[in-house]
Image: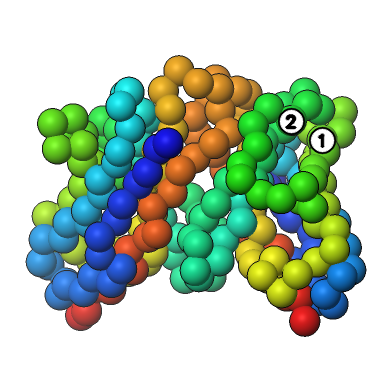
Amino acid sequence: AQRVTQPEKLLSVFKGAPVELKCNYSYSGSPELFWYVQYSRQRLQLLLRHISRESIKGFTADLNKGETSFHLKKPFAQEEDSAMYYCASQRRGSTLGRLYFGRGTQLTVWP
Amino acid sequence: KAGVTQTPRYLIKTRGQQVTLSCSPISGHRSVSWYQQTPGQGLQFLFEYFSETQRNKGNFPGRFSGRQFSNSRSEMNVSTLELGDSALYLCASSFDRSSYEQYFGPGTRLTVT
């Protein structure tokens, strides 16, 4: 079974500081990996997926197959980054529908 | 384009009752998935529908069921409600089964008393 682990339930940083949200996955194959974000009183939305290698809102995430990690990073956090972040995986090659989510990390960026 | 819509947004039911939740996907999207979100278990996959057929099912009892209509709209039903069914139920749609991007609705908050 696929498992996604986000070891930090809460993370606080000051504005302008670097931030890293950790995510580890367990799956013998090569899953598709995503970061979803939920801002206060908004719906869950896709932030980025590893295959697109994009940088969204200054966030990047690198897949490390050796460590089975997909940590989310931003060099300079902003107050508007405060939100709940979920790491998710989906079995590559399988048909759509089943995302496995981590428990989420609540990021707070202090002014 | 309008986003995924879910109705009702809030619902209060009593133990033993049944409930039906509705989801309208983004226009043109044909795949609909349902998730349950609780503080204790987080986000858990319920099922996925495509072309009016259930394609994937999560580890939930048979009291949880769903269906999809020809216009891709989907409903999920929970029978014989239990207190533990209190949760936020999220619906997500995607263009088709090969698309990895899912768009989520605002959810239906179900409270069972």
Subunit under mark 1: B
Specify the amino acid type for callout 2. Gln
Q: Position of residue B82 (x, y in %)?
A: 75, 69
**SS at circle 1:** strand
Residue B82's place in the image compared with A92, above or below, is: below
State the mark number for residue A32: none
**SS at circle 2:** strand
Instruction: Describe the colour scheme in one phrase.
Output: rainbow
Question: Badge 2 is on which residue?
Answer: B54
Q: Earlier in the sequence, mark 2 or mark 1?
A: 2
Residue A3's place in the image compared with B97, above or below, is: below
Q: Are marks 2 and 1 on the same chain?
A: yes
Question: Callout 1: 10 Å neighbours few (<14), some, many (20+)?
Answer: many
Q: Position of residue A67 (x, y in %)?
A: 14, 37
Could you tell me which quadrant the C terminus of chain A lies in?
bottom left
Mark 2 and mark 1 in contact? Answer it, CB < 8 Å: yes
Specify the amino acid type for callout 1. Gln
Give the residue at the far front of this rendering: B61
| Residue A5 visible in the displayed image | yes
- In which image quadrant can residue A13 be found? bottom left
Q: What residue do we see at 23% from left, 70% from top? A: A11
Locate residue A107 relative to residue B6 in the image: left or right: left
Locate residue A57 relative to residue A41 in the image: left or right: left
Q: What residue do we see at 77% from left, 81% from top? A: B113
Q: What residue do we see at 22% from left, 53% from top? A: A22
Front position in the image: B76 or B69: B76
Question: Badge 1 is on which residue?
Answer: B68
Q: Position of residue A84 (x, y in %)?
A: 39, 64
Residue A18's place in the image compared with B30, above or below, is: below
Q: Position of residue B86 (x, y in %)?
A: 68, 70
